[in-house]
Image (tube, grey):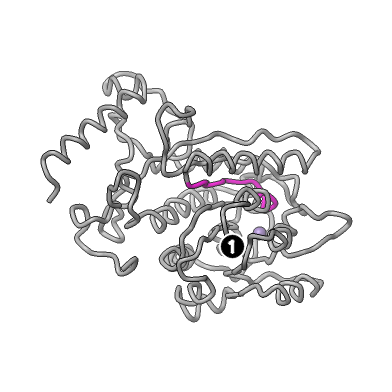
Amino acid sequence: MRSTKEQSRRVAQRRVSAAASGPNGASPEGPRVRHHTFYGVPPYDGAARGRTDVAFLGVPFDLGTTLRPGTRFGPEAVRAASAWWQYARDDGAAAEGWYDLDRQRWILRGVTMADWGDVRITPADIGVNLDRITEGVRSILAAGSLPVVIGGDHAITYPAIRAFGGRGPLHVVQFDSHQDFVDERHGVRLGHGNAMRRASELPFVTGISQIGLRGLQKYTEPLEASRRYGVRVVTASDLRRRGPRAATACVPAGGACYLTLDIDVLDIATAPGTGTPEPGGLAYAEVRDAIRAVARRCRIVGVDLVEVSPPYDWAEVTARAAARLVLDALSAIFDGRPRAGGARGPDSPAHAPRRRENHG
Ligand SMILES: [Mn+2]
């Protein structure tokens, strides 16, 4: 059981975060100001609140899209859909986490988060925008937070990964129905179909795993190049047949990994609101369980969620799946991981009836 001292420390901490959250925290009965942020987390306010475990960064960008644009509206749609999973209680207390009815335990309890807003996007200039994305992610890393980048089309992954330069070897785990490994087409090298090819050229990227592949492609050059590079592939059928363990087999144990989630890895019925949906895709639980398996095996140091395109969505199906998938991914990353100040994660015995089977 948690000691009384620890309990009063937590209550005091809650009061501080409630007071810091302004009028909504100070007066539970009065009118409330709703932050339009991911999960209602506090907006990033420089160093005022101190370091947070997680930093969300929106990238309203679709200049890299082939055919169907619209992912520039992705961050706002995911923010709106995430309102269902409010981070703070009505009294403004933050970092309370969520109780997962499926797993019968708290998740993300005590994990602090902030919304860093959106990267400023300038029309018609891919290069300058990608540089700003790199700068944004670099700032988050310098602040000591886990960057969680919400796109935006898949072109934003390359500049996000680029921000990890100088931080040691990095393996990239990509959930996607496409390879995005095209070198160049019509002179374009930085579109959403080129992102993984560009990432593979970064000197500190030591490998790439692609999970959920099933798209059709006209040219075999990208596939051949990915094989030469040594990309490890778990197809959609592999994952369905062999389960989450198939996903872990390709990920280096204990290594630093960047996790990129293309929403089109989900089936077209589960995620219709995306530019290049593919039938025959994975169910939500299959992807979620595979992410959990990957997170158990490696150390995830950055996350992005891309390709939500609200103009093709309806009933918020895709935005909502995306918002929940990010929470499930964060839970996989943080639950059980010691955090700043030596506090244990949300599934410490005081909170959770069942012990995790991993991180042993
Ligand atoms: Mn993709």
Relative to 344, 191 lies left or right: right
* Residue at (32% x, 57% y) in the render: 336
Quadrant in which residue 293 is drawn: bottom left
Q: Position of residue 2 (x, y in %)?
A: 14, 47
Q: Is residue 44 within the magenta segment?
A: no
Q: Is residue 150 magenta?
A: yes
- The residue depicted at 75 percent of the width and 49 percent of the height is 64
Q: Is residue 30 above or below residue 79?
A: above
Q: Residues within 10 Å of mark 1 (few under 14, many from 20)?
A: many
The image shows residue 3 at horizontal and vertical percentages of: 12, 44
In depth, the one of 272 and 328 nearer the eye is: 328
For residue 32, above or below residue 182: above
Amino acid type at image mark 1: Val
Q: Quadrant of residue 272?
A: bottom right
Is 298 drawn above or below residue 101 in the view shown? below
Horizontal placement of 188 versus 204: left or right?
Answer: right
Q: What is the x, y in percent for residue 317?
A: 52, 51
The quadrant of the picture showing ligand 1 is: bottom right
Residue at mark 1: 172
User: Measuring 70% from the left and 35% from the top, which residue is drawn there?
Assistant: 121
Q: Which residues are magenta?
A: 146-156
Front position in the image: 306 or 332: 332
Q: The C terminus is located in which quarter?
A: bottom left
Q: For numbered disc 1, what is the local secondary structure?
A: strand
Residue occupying the far right of the picture: 186
